[in-house]
Image (cartoon, grey):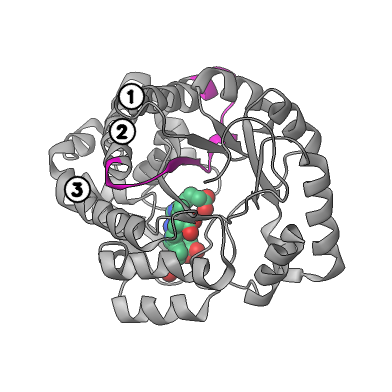
Amino acid sequence: MMPFTGTGVSPPPVWLMRQAGRYLPEYRKTRAEAGSFLDLCYTPRLAAEVTLQPIRRYGFDAAILFSDILIVPDALGQGVRFVDGEGPRLDPVRTLEDLSRLALSRTNDKFALICETVERLRQELPRETALIGFCGAPWTVATYVVEGRGSPDQSAARSWAYRDRDGFATLIELLTDASIDYLCGQVSAGADALQIFDSWAGSLADDEFERWVIGPTAKLVREVRKRHPSVPIIGFPRGAAAHLDRYVAATGIDGVSCDTACPLGVMQGIAKGGTVVQGNLDPLLLVSGGTALDHRIDDICAAMSGLPFVFNLGHGIVPETPPEHVARLVQRIRT
Ligand code: CP3
């Protein structure tokens, strides 16, 4: 199992965000067999297969459940589609009336399929490989729910939050409560640790960061812990290096995943305070490879040596990544 408390081990454990995905030929083959991306997520046999592919190839210390953060709005009835080459599309939720059509009671079958994938994985994975379950943080999921797609500046969600704070809070609460059930289901099914992806945490500051990032994340952590007191929970507030101390202190998470732009000095400071730090190689260095990749891996490992640390990227692997660069990374960390 990966160390989530105490001092660092050498070499550090390693896994990569989006380690299952289009850069792997075996993923593309299984994805074609499944049909759509969502069919892949909702077919436990195939979702388990793609989760295991990078473990077989590289022997990572952790596997991350293959799924998506938009399963929660899909399970709530929002009608999520993934358009090839364009990304996710959802029927936008812009009013309280739109919001009233989403309901937690309809979540069960879809969550059950994802939990079945977790069960299969815990049986098939080597005991020493940690299985990480996950969800999107309520704020980040809300940005897709409101916009109906990805957006560069999350303007639809930010605008709603300013215009009608109580209405937007209702949406956040709905997503938080559904995510609590979803994460608890994953732990009951065999997940060893959880990660909360807040990819758009960096678009908020001060009171808004407190209200929409810290508050809902703290509630998620608190409620999951009531049912599963010992499960380690990692937060990934991307773009929020300036708020990391506050995020760590106020949410109660056990580990924090740092993005590509987070200075190593900031990561060291947090790890010295006893929180496990994960990060933060630039996924684009994994595309370019060469000595620049080797040097950055060495710099990150040297900076975090002796501290509670898990090697990861600062964001997900991109499809252009040559698979042999990933092999080179794992070998370099372990020798
Ligand atoms: O990390 C893993 O390997 C586990 C699986 C995982 C996926 N998405 C698979 C996926 C996880 C943890 C996610 C999280 C996710 N999904 C986030 C948060 C992390 C981040 O990247 O910021 C977000 C914002 C999403 C929403 C999402 N899903 C988008 C915007 C897209 C389209 C982008 C693209 O690359 O096409 C997806 C699709 C998606 N999720 C793919 C994968 C492997 C590609 C789908 C395909 O096979 O066509």
| Mark nearer the viewer, 1 or 3 | 1
Instruction: Tell me the quarter of the picture where residue 153 sits.
Output: top right
Say whether marks 1 and 2 touch (CB < 8 Å).
yes
Q: Residues within 10 Å of mark 2 (few under 14, many from 20)?
A: many
Label 1 vs 3, first from the N-terminus: 3
> Percent position (x, y) of residue 96?
23, 31
- Of residue 330 and residue 43, the one placed in the foreground of this image is 330
224 to the left or right of 20: left
- Of residue 95 and residue 267, the one placed in the foreground of this image is 267
Which residue is rendered at x = 53% and y = 30% of the image?
254
* Residue that mark 3 sits on: 77
| Mark nearer the viewer, 3 or 2 | 2
Which residue is rendered at x = 84% and y = 49% of the image?
299
Q: Is mark 3 within 8 Å of ligand 1?
A: no
Could you tell me which secondary element the residue under label 2 belongs to? helix
User: Is residue 305 in the magenta section?
Assistant: no
Amino acid residing under circle 2:
Ile
Amino acid residing under circle 3:
Gly
Label 3 vs 2, first from the N-terminus: 3
Instruction: Tell me the quarter of the picture where residue 331 sits.
Output: bottom right
* Residue that mark 2 sits on: 180
> Percent position (x, y) of residue 25?
51, 81
- The magenta span reads 188-210
Amino acid residing under circle 1:
Glu
What is the spatial separation of the Cα atoms under label 1 and label 2, in whole angstroms? Answer: 7 Å
Q: Is residue 134 above or below residue 82?
A: above
